[in-house]
Image: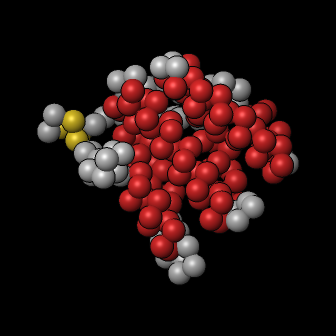
Amino acid sequence: MNLRYLCANHRQWLSENTDRAEQAWLDWMEHGRMLCEEGNHGEAIPYLGCAFDVAGMLLTREWPSYAVSATRFSDSAAQLMAAYRNQGDEKHHHYLLVGASSVLARQLGDRDKQQLAADFISALYSDGDGKPELLFAGGKPVSHGGASRQLH
């Protein structure tokens, strides 16, 4: 499953300027949240997905800091996962859950980032009411197939 939301041109354009990337992240998160609040989860997914892609780029650079970029990455992942779940798409929800937590898990070996990364991973595996996330649907592993949705 390929969950890239930004096209190559926009990815390159945003990766060249962290200020521009940050503004795009803020705009897309706000628009995606607004659409979700209106119940338009399917329409929100491309915006939240682009924000998730940008947050991943900023996390790689730890810009402006690891704490800020990890917070944004986790928030983006959680919002996007919720949008997929609210439209009944458990496959994409679980795929993002595993992928985002895997990205954060790479930081567990770094003493300075360990606690924050562990907290964000734990938060991703919570379904919002403190109950752990289930990785199996109906007793069977969730399969991962499908296409990505692009906004840009």
**Above or below, comparing residue 56 to residue 139 in the picture:** below
Q: Residue 78: horizontal and vertical position, in percent?
A: 48, 43
Q: Residue placed at 65% from the left, 60% from the top?
A: 68
Q: In the rendered image, which quarter contains the C terminus? A: top right
Q: Residue 109: horizontal and vertical position, in percent?
A: 49, 76
Q: Is residue 105 visible?
A: no
- Towards the viewer: 61 or 69: 69
Left or right: 97 in relation to 12:
left
Left or right: 18 in relation to 95:
right
Q: Residue 48: horizontal and vertical position, in percent?
A: 59, 33
Left or right: 113 in relation to 93:
right
Left or right: 59 in relation to 39:
right
**Above or below, comparing residue 151 to residue 72 in the picture:** above
Quadrant of residue 34 in the image?
top right
Q: What colouring method underlies this structural image?
A: secondary structure
Q: Is residue 64 visible?
A: yes
**Above or below, comparing residue 11 to residue 45 in the picture:** below
Residue extending furthest bottom?
A: 111
Q: Residue placed at 68% from the left, 50% from the top?
A: 57
**Above or below, comparing residue 33 to residue 102 in the picture:** above
- Please give the count of numbered marks on the rendered protein: 0
Q: Residue 102: horizontal and vertical position, in percent?
A: 45, 56
Quadrant of residue 46 in the image?
top right
Q: Residue placed at 53% from the left, 81% from the top?
A: 111
Q: Residue placed at 31% from the left, 34% from the top?
A: 143
